[in-house]
Amino acid sequence: MLRKGMQMLNDPFKNKGTAFTIEERKKYGLLGLLPSCVRTIEEQADEIYRLYQSKNSRIEQRHLLMEVFNTNRTLFFYLMEKHIAEFMPVVYDPVIAEAIEQYNERYIKPQDAAYLSIEHPDLIKEELTDAADGRDIRLIVVTDAEGILGIGDWGVNGVDISVGKLMVYTAAAGIDPSQVLPVSIDAGTNNEKLLKSANYLGNRIKRVEGQPYFDFIDKFVDAVEGLFPKSLLHFEDFGRGTAARILDKYQDKILTFNDDIQGTGIIALAGVLGAMNISKEKLTDQTFLTFGAGTAGMGIAKMLYDELIRQGLTPEEAKKHFYLVDKQGLLFDDTPGLTPKQKPFTRQRSEFANADELTNLLAIVKAVHPTVMIGTSTQPGSFDEAVVKEVAAHTPRPVIFPLSNPTKLAEAKAADLLKWTDGKALIATGIPVKDIEYNGTVYQIGQANNALIYPGVGFGALAAEAKVLNDNMLAAAAHALSGLVDPEKPGAAVLPPVSKLTEFSKRVAELVAESAIDQGLAGDEITDAKKVVEEKIWKPRY
Ligand SMILES: NC(=O)c1ccc[n+]([C@@H]2O[C@H](COP(=O)([O-])OP(=O)(O)OC[C@H]3O[C@@H](n4cnc5c(N)ncnc54)[C@H](O)[C@@H]3O)[C@@H](O)[C@H]2O)c1
Ligand SMILES: O=C(O)C[C@H](O)C(=O)O
Ligand SMILES: [Mn+2]
């Protein structure tokens, strides 16, 4: 057994480090375990921030912040509160991608996550119970890491994405960090580099697929429902062949959410609505081209489609607004290898005289004239000058969102898009981009990353004790961000800035909670959305 004082210092949910007062040091057996000076949280935060600034790479900065996170959650989130826009790219995307790639080499602590192995379905309950360690878990982010951002299969290294997504939940929306549990499902990996690496910490087996895999997922979901019945189960970075199938199975039965499908869909719709505010065009007049029709691409198409229906189009009319492009080129109803989610949105070859030539993006753009082009393809640079100029030739304010993450995979750089369209493009990117000056105007670039929306969505659903998260609640979230940017300002962004993340996450949470209440899906006692959201916000204070 750890000594009482050591137990306190080793518990990141309770530890205050040098901020323990003399009284507390006496009470918790900490006398002699700390230097004599008692610090305030402000002083501790200032010291860490100075140290942070002295680090000369972002991965080292991340490492420092993770050390704080691992030892003292309150201090970590206090720092996040003060420096949210600066720290987000370091603790989250894009630097998190580097951390995942270097996970084995840099491994020090397991970060209070639950590690489940496909080799031991019989141990799921025990593993979750041990990892929760008696805490009242309300939110789980689980990954099997088959599709980490756009960087592929990273096996157990992917646990960082579960940890990172949960950090953003607390920093943005105020979920109590002691009520969250990151989960890694180690179902093997097809990443040859990991399989061959002496340092790899996960199961050194090929990814388990098919029925045994889905049986494991079912067992996992059952265990979560049994152990943590009031929790929201958030799925992150599963593969194209599993993410939608799992969501479809569970979304009407339990409180669950797929961030890559639904979170990305909401933020992309919010961004397109923001673009419409600026261009003064109608959503129902747009032609959408989705480049990369996988998990995220189809989540986005579905959210845009649902909005067109809400705006009065029939399903047949709405579908005519979409063109999906994937590896095969423009997707037709007879294209081989279509996924179940792609099938309803395919086109017919008879619509085009040159259908068989529509296998590259430039040819497709020439044939289709999209007004909104969204990239979730993991193909860097695919929105090149010729493609972008062709889009801009047929619409006054082309809406172009290169959303693939991390930075190295983006379909285009925002500065190039502005240059190639003479400042006309309405842009959102997956990763944060600094303001860009072009021809005397300063352009702010919106970040269409699901991190801007999922914290509010999840928190709202939890605050309302919602039974499920349904399309109406997602739509409420997509509309929550409108009106936060002045569309008349030259160079205005299509989405509000990350510096306001905490503010607008609260608004998203309130509207999602309200939707649950209005639909009769909230907990019995819950009637006032604003009140329950306010009451449940956790603040990083000692
Ligand atoms: N900004 C955000 O919030 C956000 C959210 C989710 C995903 N993403 C990004 O989107 C990308 C895709 O993620 P996903 O989860 O949908 O992965 P996915 O594997 O499910 O989908 C990627 C799709 O791109 C297709 N593709 C590959 N090469 C192509 C090519 N040359 N031309 C056209 N299509 C091609 C694949 O066949 C697949 O259908 C990733 O980079 C990810 O980081 C961004
Ligand atoms: O993690 C991100 O930055 C967004 C998204 O969930 C992704 O998979 O790229
Ligand atoms: Mn993701």
Image: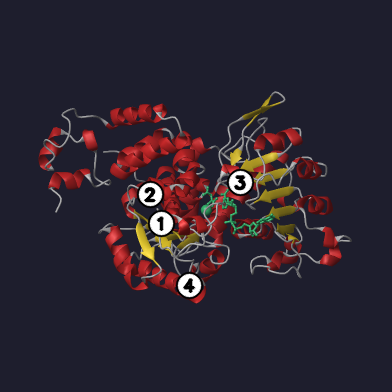
Element class at badge 4: helix
Q: Is residue 542 above or below residue 361?
A: above
Amino acid type, label 2 = Ile
- Sequence-first disc among 3 and 2: 2
| Amino acid type of the residue that numbered disc 1 sits on in the rendered structure | Leu
The answer to whether mark 3 is within 8 Å of ligand 1 is yes
Query: Given this view, does label 3 or label 2 mark the residue nearer the observer?
Result: 3
Q: Quadrant of residue 29?
A: top left
Give me the C-alpha separation between circle 4 and circle 2.
30 Å
* Amino acid type shown at disc 4: Phe
Q: Closest to the observer: 119 or 392?
A: 119
Quadrant location, the C terminus: top left
Query: Counting residues from the N terminus, which is met first, the one under dot 3 or under dot 1?
Result: 3
User: Which residue in the protein does label 3 denote?
Assistant: 409
Q: Nearer the viewer, residue 357 or 429?
A: 357
For discs 2 and 1, the disc positioned in front in the rendered view: 2
Q: How far apart are the alpha carbons under marks 3 and 1?
A: 34 Å
